Image (cartoon, helix red, strand yellow):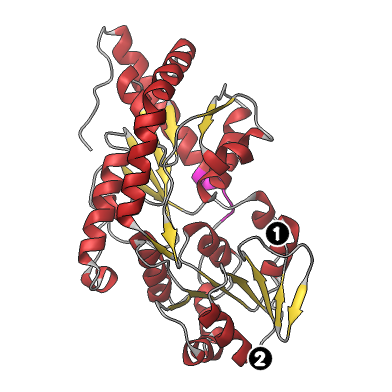
Amino acid sequence: MGHATRSRVVIDHLLSDHDVQVVASGAAYEYLSQSLPRVEQIFGPTFAMREGQIQRWATVVGNLRKVGRELPHTVREWLARVHEWRPEVVITDFEPLAALYARHAHSPLIAVDNINMLDRCRHDTEIIGAEREDFRIAKAVTHSMVGGANEYVVTTFFRPAVSRQRTTLVPPIVRPEIEAATAERGDHLVVYSSGDPVLLDALRASGVPCRVYGMRGGPEADTREGNLEFRPRSNDGFVEDLRTSAGVVAGGGFSLLSEAVYLGKPVLAIPLRGQFEQLMNARYLEREGFGLCAERVDDETVRAFLAGLDEFEAALAGYEQDGNAFTLETIERLAREVAAEDARELRRGRRLARRPA
């Protein structure tokens, strides 16, 4: 859903001056099709999960079965429809079929996402840590998903050295309601968790008021258990709780981390096991001084986070981001540039060359 909410911001910006057709799968399709014109549903991969950890082999097997059953028909039908429309530029937030179309039609391609940080920047041994094999797998998958783009726009709140050409680092894309929010420091923590009992026990022991979102199924109304208040799904409620919080406890997903950083909220990041991108985000968050990365949580970890709130806030005060303006202007500028270059090549009788990734 982080891909979908970011894409919604980009699409809304582009719709003011451009004709835009949207393709998405799964929950992203459900979200985008409610409010945008011309949204097509396509095949998309899914993750197999067990006890909060990605099951790699089950994920591969499950998606291979889906590919054999759904992909050939979906791709043929979808490619034919889009090819009739003939877009001048393809923009993708880590959606591989859009990239496949761009290669098939020799159309300019721009990748806008945070995940290409894995492949297009240099990461030192402190960030990679003992998970070198996980890093290599994640980097290889990332490289293969959206290879050969003309430009890569990588959204990020941290700035490692760029290792590949045609890579532009820009501030994260935040939802309009986050961009408009005024941060205040309250006394509660916002917790986004699937319900890890060890984490919940550690938060209970802290005595700090916690407003918990993300529980599987979720309560239909607020439910209080001591200092823990379990909240139903609510976009407005979540944004209000986030902007008035003292800090955030969440996984290592980029969207929520970037929203917390934007609002100056310290984060205790607990990355999903088996998901190196989340681990990378959390380690960079700690390096920047914006919070802590904790692969396991206990009472001592929560106490350390609470004790460091003032220090984390001081570091976050130095973070600068002027809403989404610079990032959206960069995306549109690059789209115009690659489209113009492609048009020049067409007039000369040559198509814009697909460059190696």
Q: Residues within 10 Å of mark 2 (few under 14, many from 20)?
A: few
Query: Foreground: 262 or 219?
Result: 219
Q: Give the extent of the magenta segment.
A: 322-327
Contact flag, marks 1 and 2 (Cβ < 8 Å): no
Query: Residue 206 sits in which quadrant?
Result: bottom right
Q: Is residue 202 left or right of residue 292?
A: right
Decide: few, some or many residues near mark 1? Use Cα within 10 Å; few <14, some 14-19, many ≥20.
some
Determine whether 224 is above or below 232 in the image. below
* 86, 194: nearer the viewer: 194
Q: Is residue 187 visible?
A: no
Residue 116's spot in the image, x, y percent? 34, 49
Residue 144 figure quarter:
top left
Q: Nearer the viewer, residue 240 or 202?
A: 202
Check if residue 155 falls in the magenta segment: no
On residue 159, the disc is none
Label 1: which residue?
233
Residue at 25% of width from left, 73% of height from top? 129
Magenta stretch: includes residue 325: yes
Tag 2 residue: 207
Residue 345 lies, in percent from the top left, at 29, 14
Secondary element at image label 2: loop
Asked where in the image residue 205 lies, by quadrant, the reply is bottom right
Q: Is residue 215 visible?
A: yes
Q: Position of residue 229 (x, y in %)?
A: 72, 76
- Seen at 64% across and 26% down, the residue is 37
Q: Amino acid at mark 1?
A: Arg
